[in-house]
Amino acid sequence: MARELPTELLNKYYARGVELCDAETSMFCYCGRLATGLHTMHCARFATKVRSKCKELAKAAGEVW
Ligand SMILES: [Zn+2]
């Protein structure tokens, strides 16, 4: 059953998604550039990956993103 996730939960998934993506890009970002914190914060490719991680996490938890 589809329902809206509370912002608090969305933020939790988002933070976890960023963590997972950071772990995967210890040297280079998904776009191939050096994965500095400053870069990944502004990288569209990184943001897309974070969103897909969020969806996976929510799905695994039985939530609808
Ligand atoms: Zn990047």
Image: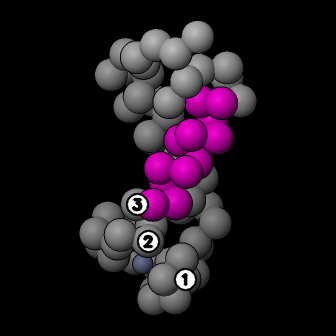
Residue appearing at x 61%, y 61% in the figure: 23
- Residue 55: which disc? none
**Which image quadrant: the N terminus?**
top right
Mark 3 residue element: helix
Residue hosting label 1: 28
The 10 Å Cα crowd at callout 1, few under 14, some 14 to 19, many 20 or more, is: some
Q: Quadrant of residue 6?
A: top left
What's under tag 2, amino acid-wise?
Arg
Mark 2 residue element: helix
Q: Position of residue 39 (x, y in %)?
A: 33, 76
Residue hosting label 2: 45
Mark 1 / mark 2, whichever is N-terminal: 1
Mark 1 residue element: loop
What's under tag 3, amino acid-wise?
Ala
Residue segment shown in magenta: 48-59
Cα distance between the residues tagged 3 and 2: 5 Å
Q: Position of residue 57 (x, y in %)?
A: 63, 36
Residue hosting label 3: 47
